[in-house]
């Protein structure tokens, strides 16, 4: 049916044209901006992620710039350090030349003074952005203080819960500083610094884990007749790992006479007599135990010959025909000691330090084990307490941590309580109770100490020992070389972190692009198709609008 009031064809064509125009507008926006998600209404999720990641890229870019600043600081210090190494080599050559008897030491000293000034100038000028890793102005000696550090931002991190943090790489400048106002630099004497001293009061000692034993009161003299006897079970070396080993012990007239002689006529008169008789009875039963007497009582101790790890004594099942107390064996022990492990304690004194190149060592042994040497150097201290400790052991807790770290290999353990340090053997490694432990007196190795300042070297005085200076300078040069190696490793680490930050920014760009960038090939194809659709829609609308004119022609 045709109508002159409602043109259904025109309405359909108009609707199609509006839809095509809307899609064409969207495609044109994608083409012009290069983005398929340009605002939150396009895709709220992708837009939010992309916005956050762009912000994180900005933070990572700032970290990358900071790494460049840190790299420049380390590069400047490394350049200065290598120049100092070359100057020290020239300095040493001049010292060696001064050993010739015919040279003028005053002239050589003039050259040495110039080289000293050169090293000082290098150290003071090796500064970048106000940070100097070769020269420092702290009033306290570097060897008696915590690490002097500078930090370089190294990473921007966003965790799974959305929190963010900037991670820093700390650089310990006490390992690179050549000169410090208060001393402790690599080219300064060790004598004015905190050193090994008396090792905080640490001394060697020999201790014994007390052998397990039982004490009994001697209840009185008894004479054994031909039919008299005392029998009991003796259990040795029971502990948590073993129920012990039991032996049947019998004392009769023959055992008494064998132990005390025929003159005793089978009579036990004293506690020492009782001990002698027990020893003879133990021997007869093959029991690895021993007895001792005196002071109105007797004691039975294990000889730890059972092969078990325990060290204990227990008597049971006593049967006697010479009195209910069996001369004291049937009565409860007056004292009992079992499974004691050796230990030794000392009170920690004043704090001390283990400087670079120095150490202390001692020998450690348990029972019949071979002597093992335990050595504590600067690396041991810093590994146990952290690099910031700077080799300083300041308390009993610190000492216990260091000795634990150093003694782990040989089974030495240390604990601290109330300012005291207690040393024991690892019971898992040395499970046998009641044996001795020995710690030899500590030996201090100070061969790596330098007792003069580089700036104070003077060979003009009569009788100057040039070899003394050469030896000390060699130690200084080795320290400076190690510091240069440290700076080199820092350069490498910062370089790797910079490369990672650069790669991370590129990765973020790619990730954001996958979310929000428009596919231009696809968008160009869409644009051409939608422009064609638009033309067709316009033509369709034009044809639809001509329909009423055809109806009017019917009424002419």
Image (cartoon, grey):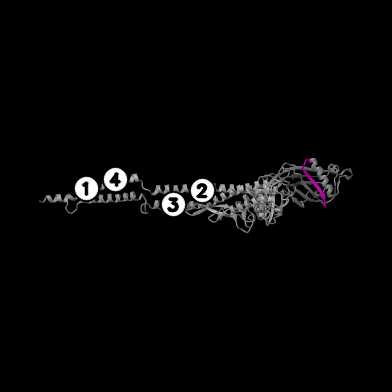
CA separation, marks 3 and 1? Answer: 47 Å
Mark sitting earlier along the chain (3/2):
3
Q: Where is residue 404 in the image (x, y as percent from the top left)?
A: 66, 49
Q: Position of residue 443 (x, y in %)?
A: 72, 48
Magenta stretch encompasses residue 519: no
What element does badge 4 sit on? helix
CA separation, marks 2 and 1? Answer: 63 Å
- The tally of labels here is 4
Q: Position of residue 478 (x, y in %)?
A: 63, 47
Point out the residue furthest to the bottom here: 139
Residue of label 1: 539
Q: Which residue is drawn at 31% across and 46% down?
A: 526
Mark sitting earlier along the chain (4/1):
4
Residue of label 2: 497
Mark sitting earlier along the chain (3/1):
3
Tell which of 263 and 188 is nearer to you.
188
Point out the residue furthest to the left here: 556
Point out the residue furthest to the right here: 263
Residue of label 4: 528
Mark sitting earlier along the chain (3/4):
3
- The answer to whether marks 3 and 1 mark residues whose Cβ atoms lie closer than 8 Å is no
């Amino acid at each position: 049916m045709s109508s002159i009031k409602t043109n259904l064809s025109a309405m359909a064509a108009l609707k199609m044209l509006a839809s095509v125009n809307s899609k064409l507008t969207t495609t044109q926006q994608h083409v012009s901006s290069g983005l398929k998600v340009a605002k939150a209404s396009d895709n709220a999720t992708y837009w939010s992620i992309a916005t956050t990641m762009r912000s994180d890229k900005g933070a990572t870019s700032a970290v990358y710039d900071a790494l460049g600043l840190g790299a420049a600081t380390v590069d400047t210090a490394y350049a200065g350090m290598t120049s100092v190494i070359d100057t020290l080599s020239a300095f040493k050559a001049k010292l060696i030349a001064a050993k010739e008897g015919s040279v003028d030491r005053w002239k050589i000293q003039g050259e040495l003074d110039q080289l000293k000034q050169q090293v000082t100038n290098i150290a003071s000028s090796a500064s970048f952005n106000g940070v100097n890793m070769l020269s420092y102005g702290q009033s306290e000696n570097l060897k008696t203080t915590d690490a002097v550090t500078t930090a370089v931002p190294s990473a921007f991190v966003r965790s799974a819960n959305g929190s963010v943090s900037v991670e820093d790489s700390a650089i310990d400048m006490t390992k690179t500083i050549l000169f410090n106002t208060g001393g402790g630099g690599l080219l300064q004497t060790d004598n004015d610094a905190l050193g090994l001293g008396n090792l905080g009061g640490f001394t060697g000692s020999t201790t014994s884990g007390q052998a397990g034993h039982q004490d009994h009161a001697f209840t009185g003299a008894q004479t054994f007749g031909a039919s008299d006897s005392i029998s009991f079970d003796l259990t040795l070396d029971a502990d948590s790992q073993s129920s012990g080993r039991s032996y049947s012990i019998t004392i009769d007239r023959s055992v008494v006479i064998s132990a005390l002689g025929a003159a005793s006529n089978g009579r036990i008169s004293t506690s020492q007599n009782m001990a002698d008789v027990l020893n003879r009875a133990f021997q007869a039963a093959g029991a690895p135990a021993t007895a001792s007497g005196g002071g109105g009582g007797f004691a039975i101790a294990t000889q730890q010959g059972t092969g078990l790890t325990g060290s204990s004594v227990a008597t049971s099942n006593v049967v006697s025909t010479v009195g209910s107390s069996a001369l004291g064996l049937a009565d409860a022990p007056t004292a009992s000691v079992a499974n004691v492990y050796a230990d030794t304690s000392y009170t920690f004194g004043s704090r001390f330090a283990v400087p670079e190149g120095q150490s202390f060592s001692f020998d450690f042994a348990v029972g019949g084990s071979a002597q093992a040497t335990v050595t504590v150097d600067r690396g041991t201290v810093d590994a146990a307490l952290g690099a910031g400790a700077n080799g300083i052991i300041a308390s009993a807790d610190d000492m216990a941590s260091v000795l634990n770290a150093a003694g782990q290999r040989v089974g030495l353990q240390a604990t601290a309580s109330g300012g005291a340090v207690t040393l024991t053997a690892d019971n898992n490694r040395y499970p046998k109770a009641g044996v001795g432990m020995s710690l030899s007196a500590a030996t201090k190795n100070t061969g790596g100490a330098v007792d003069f300042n580089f700036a104070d070297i003077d060979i003009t005085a009569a009788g100057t020992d040039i070899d003394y200076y050469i030896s000390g300078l060699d130690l200084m040069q080795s320290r400076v070389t190690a510091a240069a190696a440290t700076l080199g490793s820092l350069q490498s680490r910062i370089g790797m972190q910079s490369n990672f930050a650069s790669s991370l920014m590129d990765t973020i760009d790619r990730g954001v692009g996958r979310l929000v960038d428009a596919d231009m090939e696809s968008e160009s194809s869409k644009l051409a198709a939608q422009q064609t659709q638009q033309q067709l829609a316009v033509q369709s609308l034009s044809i639809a609008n001509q329909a009423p004119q055809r109806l009017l022609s019917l009424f002419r």
